[in-house]
Amino acid sequence: MNADEIESLVAIAGRLEREIEARGTRRLKAFIIDMNPGARPPKEIEARLVAFAGKAALEQVALTYVPGPTDPMTSALYSISPDTRVKSTVLITRNRRVKEKFINLDSDDLSLARLAGSIDAASTEGK
């Protein structure tokens, strides 16, 4: 997440939660990193993530944050653009290799279906 307005990401996080419920935590893991574009202090960003988790009814999707979108010790590790036009980046991986990348994924039904399809493809690859 790289946006102050995170309401649109609730549906994406909720879909990830349902995919984990369907597959189990041994087969699928998801985490969301808040890039903290406003460089909020830790207590404030933690409260924001707790509220987000409640709104999206998250139990299995992990949430974390970094000090800011250009912090070299954290943000740079994931090679995710700090550009403010990039509101979200979703990576689908298998065996630590990126299989698909969604930039600014919409939360409409078609986009969420594409996300689920990508998860399906990655989870059945090599079987």
Image (spheres, grey):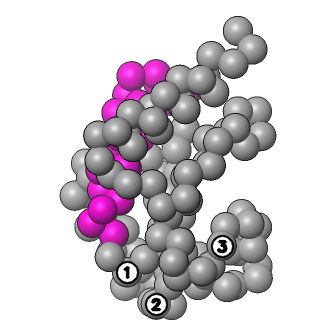
Residue 76: quadrant of the picture: bottom right
Q: Position of residue 94 (x, y in %)?
A: 70, 33
Q: Quadrant of the C terminus?
A: top right
Callout 2 secondary element:
loop
Which of the marked residues, 1 or 3, is nearer the chain's N terminus?
Answer: 1
- Residue annotated with mark 1: 4
Q: CA distance from mark 1 to mark 3?
A: 16 Å
Question: Is residue 7 visible in this depiction of the protein?
Answer: yes
The amino acid sitting under disc 3 is: Ser
Residues under numbered marks 1 and 3 in contact, where contact means CB atoms less than 8 Å apart: no
Residue 81: which numbered mark, if any? 3
Q: Give neighbour class at mark 2: few <14, some 14-19, many 20+ (Cα, 10 Å).
A: few
Instruction: Tell me the mark number nearer the camera, choosing from 3 and 2.
Output: 3
Q: Which mark is residue 38?
A: 2
Q: Earlier in the sequence, mark 1 or mark 2?
A: 1
Q: Which mark lies nearer to you, 1 or 3?
A: 3
Marked residue nearer the N-terminal end (3 or 2):
2
Q: In whole angstroms, how far apart are the C-alphas of marks 1 and 2?
A: 7 Å
Residue 55 x %, y %: 22, 58
